[in-house]
């Protein structure tokens, strides 16, 4: 046991010699940071399942891209996910099927159609492996190209810029839509902006944790931070710090123990939530 622990620094130093490891760490940290910022808003607005629904839409889009042999799947997955985000928000406000029912229908429908497409048209000899890697994350995180990393960096910076520029508006819309509308804020526009940002985060996180585990990146850091901090800004900053720390720790454990990246990150998030609950009770006393 002690020998294995002593070997960890040497193994990490060996891994860090490879560029693909740095690419994976950069992408993982950026995705964790972006998802945690909007996670607080989604939890407080009770929109947590939007991320889950959109992640299943992304699975269906990935299946369609695989069947159509699209070289860069992001070019198809991102527009489809953005369209469904707009559809959920704009259509859900006026249609007969609202809220969680619309998300559930879209989520289950996208999963079923995606799996059906893969079964009917996919020429891959390892269909079960392809489906499992898309749902729970894959090793493609370790084969990221420099172009994909720069695309992730650009989209992440855009998300961060939008959040910082419109922080006050997002804060107002999160807590009191009626007051925000009365004060002249275009509530529908900022709700739409939140949905679009979440769609971008879902697409970015697809390779990191898979479509079934994306919601964990959004929800767990926010819930953990709420056990420790009380102000919106404090919760947001704490959520971002916890999310980045858990993502880094999860990816390093995954490298050392050869475990699935997505599942390992989520397991670390769960452990952080348990610790945050204990710390929150101590602070309350």
Image (tube, rainbow, N blue to C red):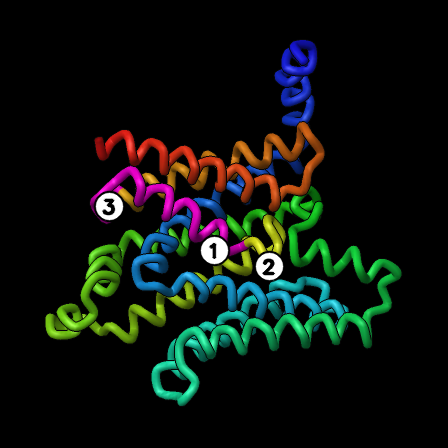
Q: Where is mark 1, residue-wise?
A: 155
In the figure, 113 relative to 255: above or below?
below
Q: Residue furthest right?
A: 125
Where in the figure is residue 285, as x and y percent of width and height?
22, 31
Tell whether position 219 is magenta: yes
Q: Earlier in the sequence, mark 1 or mark 2?
A: 1
- Number of the label disc, if any, that sits on residue 233: 3
Disc 1: CA contacts within 10 A as few (<14), some (14-19) or many (>=20): some
What kind of element bears circle 3?
A: helix
Mark 3–mark 2 distance (CA, rounded to whole Å): 29 Å
Where in the figure is residue 283, as x and y percent of width and height?
25, 31
Q: Where is mark 2, residue-wise?
A: 211
On the picture, is 246 further left or further right than 227? right
The magenta stretch spans which residues?
214-234
Mark 1–mark 2 distance (CA, rounded to whole Å): 19 Å
Tell whether position 197 is magenta: no
Q: Quadrant of residue 196?
A: bottom left
**In this view, the mark in front (3 or 1):** 3
């Amino acid at each position: 046991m002690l020998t294995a622990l002593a070997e960890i620094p040497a193994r990490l130093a060996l891994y860090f010699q490879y560029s693909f490891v740095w690419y994976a760490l950069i992408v993982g940290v950026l995705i964790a940071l972006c998802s945690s910022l909007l996670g607080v808003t989604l939890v407080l607005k009770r929109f947590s399942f939007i991320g889950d629904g959109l992640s299943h839409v992304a699975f269906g889009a990935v299946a369609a891209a695989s069947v159509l042999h699209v070289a860069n799947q992001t070019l198809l997955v991102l527009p489809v996910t953005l369209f469904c985000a707009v559809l959920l928000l704009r259509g859900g406000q006026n249609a007969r099927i609202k809220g969680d029912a619309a998300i559930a229908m879209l989520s289950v429908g996208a999963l079923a159609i995606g799996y059906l497409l893969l079964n009917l048209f996919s020429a891959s000899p390892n269909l079960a492996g392809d489906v499992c890697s898309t749902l729970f994350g894959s090793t493609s995180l370790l084969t990221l190209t420099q172009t994909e990393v720069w695309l992730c960096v650009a989209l992440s910076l855009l998300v961060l810029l939008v959040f910082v520029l419109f922080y006050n508006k997002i804060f107002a819309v999160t807590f009191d839509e009626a007051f925000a509308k009365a004060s002249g804020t275009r509530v529908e526009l900022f709700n739409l902006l939140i949905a679009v940002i979440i769609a971008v985060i879902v697409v970015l996180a697809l390779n990191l944790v898979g479509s079934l585990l994306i919601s964990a990146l959004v929800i767990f850091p926010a819930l953990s931070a709420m056990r420790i901090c009380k102000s919106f800004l404090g919760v947001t900053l704490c959520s971002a710090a916890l999310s980045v720390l858990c993502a880094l720790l999860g990816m390093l454990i995954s490298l050392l123990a050869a475990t699935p990246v997505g599942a390992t990150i989520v397991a670390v998030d769960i452990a952080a939530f348990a610790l945050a609950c204990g710390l929150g009770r101590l602070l309350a006393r």
